[in-house]
């Protein structure tokens, strides 16, 4: 590029996104979510707003964090969270967590060689519940596309009940490309759909000792065509009776248990 020429548009956009992300903050709320964030040394913490009652319950975590809390009257709990959120008198402004690169986590991260991929799961309660199950069953990461997925929010953190601070939640630019990277690293990707010809148990048996990625779509639309095509296998969770539908967080919990105990 000649001196004085303009930067390509894609570089300018990338720099703008980086600057925006550097300024991004999230408000976490609820005693469990705030306590675990306060105790997480990897979480950059900015502002803590609590009632006297909540401070009494969080006293040790607040002391460990070194933060100076703003103690407010319960009737004047004015922080930018959704009306009706059950904050329990505690809210923390913080930076989103940075878990690092996908391959570093997938190959050498803590836990079993097991990951969950979420395709267009935008409900923070579902995503938070999946994170909680992933932690319980020892998965290395929950992976979702940066766009059209549940971002790191207070609602997600509260549903995850602290798991957000310990369970990697990686949001990637392109889910299909991330899936291809995992396959190249040796992962067998199993997509879950109710009408699949093979059962989850059969698919896991065929995986042997290979690392496994469980791929789940949003309720209703399910897996996108490109996502489905990128999976190695499509499997179903068997059900009894005439009603065989699980929501995505319940399906993830069942699949994680099956994969972790194979």
Image (tube, rainbow, N blue to C red):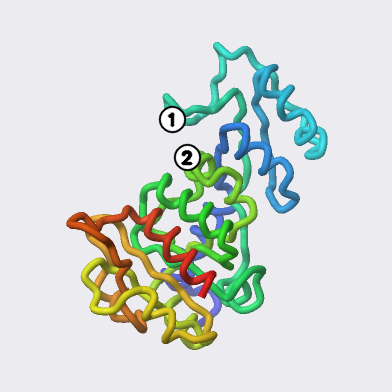
What kind of element bears circle 1?
A: loop
Instruction: From the top left corner, tell me how far across and down residue 124 is, in percent.
Output: 42, 46
Residue 226, quarter of picture:
bottom left
Q: Earlier in the sequence, mark 2 or mark 1?
A: 1
Q: Nearer the viewer, residue 30 or 201?
A: 201
At horizontal 53% and vertical 52% (from top left) the residue drawn is 132
Q: Assess disc 1: are there few (<14), some (14-19) or many (≥20) residues with their C-alpha within 10 Å of its C-alpha.
A: few
Left or right, residue 179 beside residue 198: right
Q: Is residue 145 visible?
A: no
Residue 125, quarter of picture:
top left
At horizontal 44% and vertical 63% (from top left) the residue drawn is 144
Instruction: From the top left corner, tell me how far across and down residue 259 is, in percent.
Output: 48, 71
Instruction: From the top left corner, tell me how far across and down residue 56 is, in percent.
Output: 74, 22
User: What's the distance in space between the residues labelled 2 and 1, CA to CA?
Assistant: 9 Å
Is the Cβ of the residue at disc 2 closer than 8 Å to that at disc 1?
yes
Q: Assess disc 2: are there few (<14), some (14-19) or many (≥20) residues with their C-alpha within 10 Å of its C-alpha.
A: many
Instruction: Name the residue carrying label 2.
Output: 155
Instruction: From the top left corner, tell me how far across and down residue 158 is, in percent.
Output: 53, 40
Q: Nearer the viewer, residue 235 or 217?
A: 235
At horizontal 28% and vertical 62% (from top left) the residue drawn is 239
What kind of element bears circle 2?
A: helix
Q: Residue furthest front?
A: 241
Left or right, residue 247 beside residue 64: left
At horizontal 71% and vertical 24% (from top left) the residue drawn is 55
Instruction: Name the residue carrying label 1.
Output: 82
């Amino acid at each position: 590029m000649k001196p004085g020429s303009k930067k390509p548009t894609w570089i300018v956009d990338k720099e703008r996104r980086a600057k925006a992300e550097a300024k991004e903050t999230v408000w976490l709320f609820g005693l469990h979510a705030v306590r675990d964030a306060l105790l997480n040394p990897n979480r950059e913490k900015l502002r803590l707003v609590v009632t006297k009652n909540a401070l009494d319950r969080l006293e040790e975590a607040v002391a460990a964090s070194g933060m100076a809390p703003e103690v407010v009257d319960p009737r004047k709990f004015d922080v930018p969270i959704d009306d009706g959120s059950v904050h329990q008198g505690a809210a923390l402004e913080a930076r989103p967590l940075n878990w690092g690169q996908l391959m570093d986590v997938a190959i050498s991260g803590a836990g079993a060689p097991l990951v969950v991929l979420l395709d267009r799961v935008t409900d923070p309660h579902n995503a938070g519940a999946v994170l909680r199950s992933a932690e319980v069953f020892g998965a290395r990461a929950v992976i979702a596309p940066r766009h059209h997925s549940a971002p790191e929010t207070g609602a997600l953190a509260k549903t995850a009940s602290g798991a957000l601070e310990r369970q990697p939640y990686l949001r990637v630019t392109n889910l299909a490309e991330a899936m291809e990277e995992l396959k190249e690293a040796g992962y067998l990707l199993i997509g879950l759909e109710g009408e699949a010809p093979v059962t989850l148990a059969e698919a896991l048996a065929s995986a042997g000792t290979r690392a496994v990625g469980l791929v789940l779509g949003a309720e209703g639309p399910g897996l996108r065509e490109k996502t489905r095509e990128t999976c190695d296998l499509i499997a179903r969770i068997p059900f009894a009776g005439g009603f065989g539908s699980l929501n995505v967080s319940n399906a993830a919990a069942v699949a994680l248990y099956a994969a972790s105990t194979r």
